[in-house]
Image: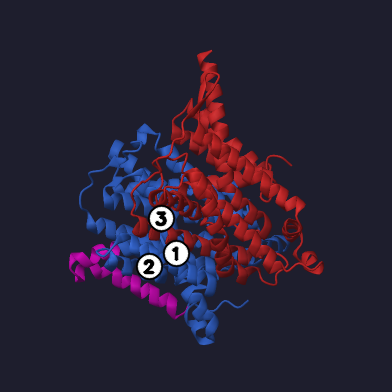
Chain colours: A blue, B red
Amino acid sequence: MRIAGLGVTFFGLLALMLLLLILPFAFPFSTSVIVINLLFYTALAYSINFITGMTGYVSFGHVVFLGIGAYALGASADVYGLDPVLGVLLGAALGLVFALMIGLVTLRFRGVYFAISTVVIALAALNIVLELPQLGGSQGIILNLGFQPYSWYYTIWGIVLFEMLITYYINRGKLGLGIRAIKSDEDAARSVGVNVSALKLYLFGLSGLFAGAGGAVFAWTTSGVFPYETFSLNFSLQMLAMIIIGGVGTALGPILGAVVVYLPSYYFLTVAIGTQLIIIGFAVVVIALFIPEGIVGTLKRRSASLRELLE
Amino acid sequence: MVALAVILSDLLFGIMLGCVFAVVAHGLNLIWGVVKVVNIAHGEFIMLGAYGAYFLNVFGGFNPLLSAVVDGALGIFVGYAFYFSFLHRELRGKERITLRSEMVTLVSTFGLSLFMSNLAVVAFTGDFVGINWSPGTVALGFLELPLGALYVTILAVLIISTSVVFLDRTYIGNAIKAYSQDITATQLVGANPTKVASLATALGFSITMAGGALLTVWIPTGINPYMGALYAPISFVIVVLGGPGKMLGSLLGGLTLGVVIDVLQAFVPVSLAYAVAFLLLIPVLLFRPEGIVK
């Protein structure tokens, strides 16, 4: 299989990130707040893309890492007065550790068994947190970190940039070949010498790390951690919806999906919150049944020239 | 002695709770076992069944047991509609379901669950509602058993055992069993795979929605658009505990879960009892992937 050089899309994404770097200085503040939310959802989409997009293991319970990250920042800032940026790093580290622990067990299960074990773990995590008085139980933790839009902005920006670079690094390297082999036929990949378990665990760890970091930023920007909100399966569902609509496994798909899912919901926010989820749900059904490769995947398959362009 | 009575009553309530869990999971078990597809939106169809019972009660004065029959009949149509819109394209002409098709069905039914639960908020509002039906209690030694729960337990066992007899003793039931074992061979002996698979799906939905109606007896104030998010995972755990496709497995899994939850509640907070019950799935998948009983 030929791996083409870095294409237009890569430099386009880099240019976009550079533009976003100076955005807070060029535009009024309300714009940056929208972009912070957009980047937050982009970060989540890239995070789940590492496991579900790249290997085809559907992680319905991915919100568990977001919750762990959020509580890491919440508890460390609340009890020890830790700097929120360090809290984000702690969230990422705990996300990684938990992903490795959970992945070590659940990645042995294939297909639907993996999917349901992740759902069950996310629900169990919520039920356990509710009974931990150290983490505020069902009340959660209310933080008083103040309004720090620049720090929020550049933290989440950095997370997304890292995710994009790692996505490219994986997709283009030898790792990517092994991972694509797992996605198309895990047993065949194993038999030709791909270290299947290690690769899957590596990807799951990465996705847990970034979901943890994203969750910590979420706690930071909302200045609080509330169990039902941070462990809400709606987050898992939105993450999945974004990569399914954008195109699973691709480098462009997650950000495209985040834009397509988040921006309309931002405008519809004033109409009705439930309506957007109805539309997202419907879109996921239609896309999964009729164009399972999502926007990017379908464009790549339809046209050879676009295929080069969208790599 | 008092402690013993408490544990005994917990055990009995656990068994009754387990039976209602079992019937709620049974439809999923049938579909999972026969067409090898897991419906992630399973919980939303339970929710639909529960709301069906609620509205039949409000507008028609039906009690939940009667509503279960109506829901069950409606479920047949819903099941056929589900089969032909979600599964037919993936299953048609295949000897066994591919991993790719499995992903498609997982993701599309997940979209369906998001769609249905949020549409239900718009249609039914997000308020918790319930059915006010209490046929009284019956004394059993030192225990007072609610009659409603007792009826539900009997009906649950009846539904599950009927499905076993149906699959074992009727021609079409045998065809469904054959389909679950070998699709090509089923075709060779003259059964139309689409007819068989769609019938099994329709029956699964019928039982699921009837189960939703029966569940309302246990949750006097708990019918709401998001209830599926709790009962779907419970059903997944039950089916895995019992072994997908083993009809009596639903009963076994449901009873295990019900007893574990009710007995643990005597010692730890409710949410921890549920956490433990959910996590039972992991060791079972690791060590007994074919279910706790071979």
Residue reaching furthest top? B1
Secondary structure state at the residue bearing disc 2: helix
Q: Are marks 2 and 1 on the same chain?
A: yes
Tell me how far mark 3 sits from mark 2, CA to CA.
13 Å
> Sequence-wise, which precedes: disc 3 or disc 2?
3
Residue type, label 3: Asn
Foreground residue among A128 and B65: B65
Foreground residue among B55 and A14: B55
User: Which residue was labeled with disc 1?
Assistant: A241
Secondary structure state at the residue bearing disc 1: helix
Q: Is residue A32 left or right of residue A42?
A: left
Foreground residue among A245 and B22: B22
Label 1: chain letter: A
Q: How many marks?
A: 3
Label 2: chain letter: A
Q: Is residue A242 visible?
A: no
Q: In the rendered image, which quarter is residue A157 located in? A: bottom left
Q: Is residue A144 left or right of residue B3?
A: left
Q: Are marks 2 and 1 in contact (CB under 8 Å)?
A: yes
Segment colored magenta:
A7-36
Say above or below: B184 vs B24: below
Q: Residues within 10 Å of mark 2 (few under 14, many from 20)?
A: many
Which residue is painted at 32% across and 66% down in the image? Answer: A265
**Does the magenta segment cover residue B12?**
no
Secondary structure state at the residue bearing disc 3: helix
Tell me how far mark 3 sits from mark 1, CA to CA.
10 Å
Which residue is painted at 49% across and 80% down in the image? Answer: A299
* Label of residue A234 in the image: 3
How far from the left and from the top, in percent, is residue A275? 34, 64
User: Which residue was labeled with disc 2?
Assistant: A261
